Image (cartoon, coloured by chain):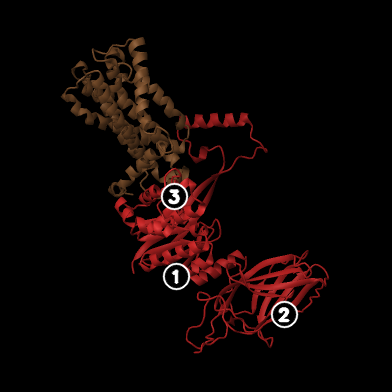
Amino acid sequence: MGAIHYWRELWRYRELFFFLAWRDILVRYKQTAIGVAWSVIRPLATMLVFSVVFGRLAKLPSNGVPYPVMVYAAMLPWQFFANALAESSNSLIDNANLLTKVYFPRLIVPASAVIVSLVDFLISCVILCGIMAWYRFVPDLKILLLPLFLLMAFFVSFGAGLWLSALNVKYRDFRYVVPFLVQFGLYISPVGFSSAIVPEQWRFWYFLNPMVGVIDGFRWAILGGAFSVNWPGFLLSSALVVLIFLGGVAYFRRMERSFADVV
Amino acid sequence: MSNVISIENLGKKYLLSHRSERGSYVALRDVLADGARQLGRRLLGRSGAAGARQPQEEFWALQELNFEVQQGDRIGIIGRNGAGKSTLLKILSRITEPTTGSVRIRGRVASLLEVGTGFHPELTGRENIFLNGAIMGMSRVEIARKFDQIVDFAEIERFLDTPVKRYSSGMYVRLAFAVAAFLEPEVLIVDEVLAVGDAQFQKKCLGRMKEVGREGRTVLFVSHNMDFIKLLCSSGILLHGGRNLYSGEVDSAIAKYESLMTDSVYVGDRGSDVVYQNEAVNSDAFDIIQVKICDKKDQPISQVNTFDSFKFRVKFHSPDCYESKSAALFVSNLNRRPLLRLAMYPYSPFTMHCKKGTNEFICQLEKIPLPAGTYLLIFGICESQTGEWLFERDLCPFEIGTTDIYQSGVPPTDKLCVAVSDYFWTGV
């Protein structure tokens, strides 16, 4: 199937992106008691734990900004990435019955998983506003650039999700790889600490992690002047984001035609 | 008339793996050794099929398939289980790709390969209508517009806001079909989904599908129920072992299918008086040898028409001498429902004395009251006292030709009615 034809198909099925995401969100809160409150409690609780562990106990520096705000500003994109990865990597297998019985462009399945994480992200953003209000912290105009970094986070999550979901269909081992990746990634990404403390000789390898660029960008936009970004490092991370995304789309499209036979 | 679907040299291959013969159990030691070897091979580079530890067999689900479908055709795809019907539908629905050959389809395709695809048990009926509709390619606006029609067709208005997991299976099926019934694709593909649901619902579904056909859309329908196929389809494609055995008139396709099911030779217009011949007679038990037809003067005939009077000459093999057995010949419809039961016991006063070896008996029929069409001949032998069946076999398709018995220019066929009789209307 030609490339133009494929993207035209995707456009025709555009509503399905939201329908599948809507379905997953609805199902999440069916027959729950406090339902939507969980979207608030989860990020809040994680932020509290991090503030205590890394801020009070490990006493990592925070450049004059309230520690919870610094942590939260980084947790926002990280949670989005982690959730998106976890959901999208299993999305094809979870929707196996759809894959074998109905035709629609398969790209929609992992994409809608990322959209679900996006909704969680937006709720967490509201909480961030609450936290900033609590600490009477006012961000400067750089916060208007936040959507740009959000876009970066989206592309890296979606790209990684495409890789993993396609691989997972054929080699179920990847189901076990993902939680490990997420756990490991949490410690090598600047969530609990800031990029400034990374020693010079490891900088290059450190910035190969695409989430470093994303998280640094988020911190810079939200926290303003207190944080400076290592721009060369940022560019390196961005390049990885683009690579992962394009590679993911290419690999997924190549494997797509055999999904129904293999899943 | 334009080609809506063209299929050229279509083939679909699957690889089957077989566990290597190593005794009746698989030891953990072997599993670990195999796994390590596989991993090593994979890490060192592409191993491909040649390096596969387990022998793999090629299975061609479809081979060398060629046919064309015009717009507005209603085609029934029939065949035994495993003939490749569902695989063909999956390829036409673009769910899986062909291994060889090409498929060209013009227009939007909607397929109903399974009821309730995309239904989520936690969501309510209302939510599932939108979800299912979206998955099948309808836009939200379209679904909202047809919402009332869909709910009406499914008859579940009271239960719209209950989660679907609480529905009975009948309600579930009605809802699932209702959503698919109101799609407006150029090509509609339906796979065996009418098998569920009660008779009234099946009638409704058939009615809806006929309407879809009348609207000028192309319908491809797979079923094992020959009555549905006959009612709905104008042409048929018979698949057997992945190949296209016959495509053309639906009645001939069905007759050929029946001959496959009964392991007999398709008679067609063979012009012989032998309706059925068994090549391999089992000499240790009861077995049928041959069935011939002839007229009342014992002259061989090759064709029977409506209201004809004729004789069946049945030859069968008996393992011993018996006084207490009875034989029966059935003329059934293609769903194996007996329309005529020509039994010695208990209906006729004839007592059968069978001897060891070949026996021949004659059954004479007066004015066979069946309209033109394809039927199934079934022969059985039972105990006279208890009626317990000792031997029963579907013999072969049996065709009855047309006779304009009412002199109206419209001879009755089995599409119109199951049986015919002399009758007339008068005023009071």
Q: Amino acid at mark 3?
A: Thr
Mark 1 or mark 3, earlier in chain? 3
Is residue B8 at all visible to an observer of this figure?
A: no
Of B184 and B220, the residue lying toward us? B184
The residue wearing badge 3 is B117
Q: Amino acid at mark 1?
A: Ser
Q: With respect to residue B335, does A34 lie above or below?
A: above
Q: Position of residue B217 (x, y in %)?
A: 36, 64
Q: Chain of mark 2?
A: B
Farthest residue in the left direction? A141
Q: Chain of mark 3?
A: B
**Which residue lies at the image location 27% right of the left edge and 28% below the top edge?**
A126
Question: Chain A rendered in what hue?
Answer: brown
Mark 2 or mark 3, earlier in chain? 3
Q: Amino acid at mark 2?
A: Ile
Question: Chain B rendered in what hue?
Answer: red
- The answer to whether B249 appears left or right of A23 in the picture is right
Mark 2 residue element: strand
